[in-house]
Image (cartoon, rainbow, N blue to C red):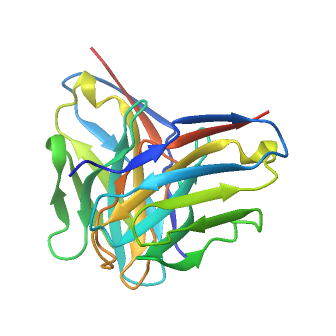
Amino acid sequence: DTGVSQNPRHKITKRGQNVTFRCDPISEHNRLYWYRQTLGQGPEFLTYFQNEAQLEKSRLLSDRFSAERPKGSFSTLEIQRTEQGDSAMYLCASSRNRATNEKLFFGSGTQLSVL
Amino acid sequence: AQSVAQPEDQVNVAEGNPLTVKCTYSVSGNPYLFWYVQYPNRGLQFLLKYITGDNLVKGSYGFEAEFNKSQTSFHLKKPSALVSDSALYFCAVNLSAGNKLTFGGGTRVLVKP
């Protein structure tokens, strides 16, 4: 169990640029989640995958955001035409299966700063 | 809809004293309740969960939480706090038929020597 890995740890970009983050979940974890956390707030749900299928997206996820999990393993989160309001910590989490009482394993996050 | 409230932004306690972090929830069905802790520059770590059964749940690092259905609360407790317990604590709720956790705003715990 090597834990959930997220890359990069930090990303600084200029407004209007595109950014992509990567998440490698714990191997054989079927569920993968993306959350966003701003300073002083709790994590907010963005989207989740069951294997390669994206099953739910939050209304927070505008059309500038897209997430993929092409082979049911790692996932990417892309933000197009970044805005200063996108500055936040982006957290990835995984769980073993689809049971709703499963605990989530979180990565350390990607801190995005949009200048 | 489901929501979680953590009424205290920060809790200060002296080392060795009891620690309580408050959480109330609102759901339209049977709740699954969780506590997570976040240390600086680290990901959130699971502490404990309530699914069903005994209202008192014991978790990691000596923490426990009590589920109170009538008060819709799930307060986190530790009988004797340590300086190393200083961190950010999050309460979260999921519906028994739900697919995602909803987190509270977090409570910062500061344990002073």
Between A6 and A39, the one nearer to me in the picture: A6
Residue B77 left/right relative to A90 = left
Q: Is residue A10 left or right of residue A114?
A: left
Q: Image quarter for residue B17? A: top left
What x and y, as percent, mark residue B67?
A: 27, 65
Q: Is residue A113 left or right of residue A17?
A: left
Q: Residue furthest right?
A: A16
Between residues A14 and B43, which one lies in front from this camera angle?
A: A14
For the point 34% across and 28% down, the residue is: B86
Note whether residue A33 is visible: yes
At which x and y percent is residue B32? Answer: 33, 72
- The furthest residue to the front: A71
How many circles with numbers are drawn on the protein?
0
In this rendering, would B6 be left or right of B42?
Answer: right
| Residue A44 visible in the current orientation | no
Quarter location, residue B23: bottom left
The spot of residue B25 in percent (x, y) is 45, 66
